Amino acid sequence: QVQLVESGGGSVQPGGTLRLSCGVSGVRVNIIAMAWYRQYPGKQRELIAAVTPSDSTDYHDSVKGRFTISKDDQRNTVSLQMDGLIPEDTARYYCNGRVQWSTWGQGTQVTISS
């Protein structure tokens, strides 16, 4: 059974940085595409960044050039480096497969405010 544990969120000022991490168990990140999602209150989760087993990446237009997704095959983790944060990045962030499993972690809250 897949288990996902997100961490690294917090509250920062605009222009700040955060690094989110996702611990994955039950599946190896080197054989399946992984992704980060964000969820605004009352909205559905949306995919913002994905990484393939061969480390190809793609991003939602709103985070291109600011966020970087990566994975560590040995530690079986997926990370999201978030730079140049803006208030519109305030949301709860989750990791999951690029093709979503039904299981979700608790997510991690990111709040950007001055």
Image (cartoon, rainbow, N blue to C red):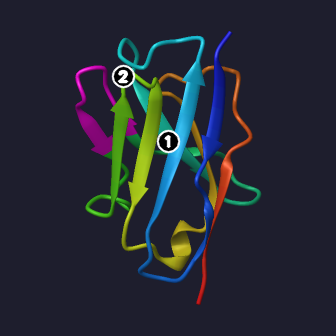
Q: Point out the image quarter for the C terminus.
A: bottom right
Tell me the SS state at disc 2. Answer: loop
Q: Residues within 10 Å of mark 1 (few under 14, many from 20)?
A: many
Q: Which residues are magenta?
A: 50-58
Q: Which image quadrant is residue 33 in?
A: top left
Q: Earlier in the sequence, mark 1 or mark 2?
A: 1
Residue drawn 26% across the image and 62% down it: 65
Give the image location of residue 73, x and y in percent.
36, 22
Give the image location of residue 103, x and y in percent.
71, 23
Q: Amino acid at mark 2?
A: Asp
Q: Nearer the viewer, residue 34 or 73?
A: 73
| 27 sits left or right of 83 in the view | right
- Residue at numbered disc 2: 73
Is residue 72 part of the magenta span, yes or no?
no
Residue drawn 74% across the image and 60% down it: 41
Residue drawn 52% across the image and 12% down it: 27
Q: Which image quadrant is residue 82 in?
A: bottom left
| 106 sits left or right of 101 in the view | right
Tell me the SS state at disc 1. Answer: strand
Q: Amino acid at mark 1?
A: Trp
Give the image location of residue 23, x and y in percent.
57, 31
Q: Residues within 10 Å of mark 2 (few under 14, many from 20)?
A: few
* In the image, residue 72 above or below residue 36: above
* In the image, residue 43 above or below residue 49: below
Q: Which mark is residue 36?
A: 1
Give the image location of residue 109, x and y in percent.
67, 58
Instruction: Name the outermost residue toward the bottom.
Output: 114
Depth check, mark 1 against mark 2: the one in front is 2
Q: Nearer the viewer, residue 24 or 56?
A: 24
Q: Point out the image quarter for the N terminus.
A: top right
Is residue 57 part of the magenta span, yes or no?
yes
